[in-house]
Amino acid sequence: MSGEAAVTLLGTKGGPAIRPGTRMPTATLMEMGGQTILVDAGLGVTRGICDAGIALTELDAILITHLHSDHYLELGPLLHTAWTAGLKRPVPIYGPDGLAAYWQGFLTSMAFDIELRIRDEGRPDLGALAEIKQMPESGLRVGPVTISSLRNVHPPIVESYTLRFECGGQSAVLSGDTAPMHDMVSFARGAELLVHEAMLAAGIDALCKRVGNGDDRLRRHLERSHTPAAEAGRIAHEAGVGALALNHLVPCDDPAFTEEDWQREVRRGWDGPIYIGQDGMRIALAPLAAQVGDA
């Protein structure tokens, strides 16, 4: 890593499905205090980490915000690939209850290959390289980085987290998947960067017609579990953050909507630096003023 604190949006698409030309689902890299921390591991994360110039063996910790597939589907393949790339030290992995069962299921599904590589190539036991731990609501530390967690509003899932990273006077907040909530304002207060999920309300009708299942359940989920872009802007303004980045974009692959549509919605509540997330976008936390021209 370069030494500067930065957030890289590896995957910025909301939802699990991909199609020709679309972005990849959710994954974010936090580089801070000499630590490289991955938040979420959606499809494409392994390639995204490498494209960001980070070796798979350099991850210091992994955090999974909740157990929707677009946030952890590639966790097992990521760890397996890091293992074949030379990973020898355990990686702490924090997440909701149920993550350990996923990991054990992955190990079972790959048992033939894993046992063969241990015997045939002299590799260490893959199972021992993932230290699966419950996300502590009291917070945790990765090296000098302090990480605070806040349960957000993402029904029907209860264990879903917003995360705040702090080190050396710098801070960044990742909203995770959430409906608008008042506690986000105080939790994100004064952060250099707020990365907030966002939904473009005008695009929901077309999205539901294209990928829905013939009733209103998808629409109900989106409306009660996610945040309209204008609300993300309002939250950023009330929290007094230095900059706002939109992530987990819904919809992100409808040609009828452009970056200008996202900008217009966000500007209803926010007049500061804004980044409309793109896969691979890297945002330095300081000095944020230098990043405005790229926003």
Image: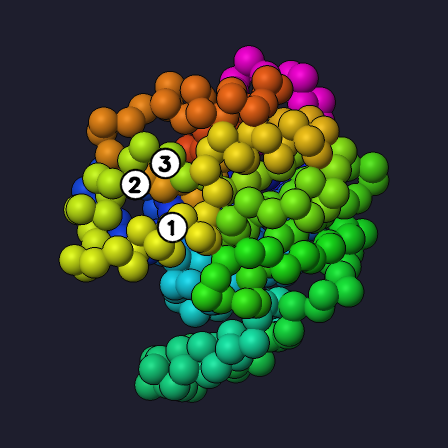
Label 2 CA crowd tier, 10 Å (few <14, some 14–19, many 20+):
some
Task: Identify which amino acid the numbered label 2 is placed on.
Answer: Ile
Frontmost residue, 159 versus 276: 159
- The residue located at (49%, 66%) in the rendering is 157
- The residue located at (64%, 16%) in the rendering is 290
Asked if residue 223 is among those painted magenta in the image, a careful observer would answer: no
Q: Which residues are magenta?
A: 282-295
Assess whether mark 1 and mark 2 are in contact (beta carbons under 8 angstroms): yes
- The residue located at (45%, 58%) in the rendering is 71
**For marks 1 and 3 on the same chain, the one whose residue lies earlier in the sequence:** 3
* Mark number, residue 222: 1
Vertical relation: 268 (above or below) 49 = above
Numbered-mark total: 3
- The residue located at (70%, 34%) in the rendering is 239
| Residue identified by numbered label 2 | 204
**Marks 3/2: CA–CA distance:** 6 Å
Image coordinates for residue 146, horizontal then vertical, percent: 78, 53
**Marks 1/3: CA–CA distance:** 9 Å
Frontmost residue, 154 versus 123: 154
Badge 2 marks a residue whose secondary structure is helix
**Marks 2/1: CA–CA distance:** 8 Å
Res. 237 image quadrant:
top right
| Residue identified by numbered label 3 | 201
Task: Identify which amino acid the numbered label 3 is placed on.
Answer: Ala
Image coordinates for residue 217, horizontal then vertical, percent: 29, 59
Assess whether mark 2 and mark 3 are in contact (beta carbons under 8 angstroms): yes
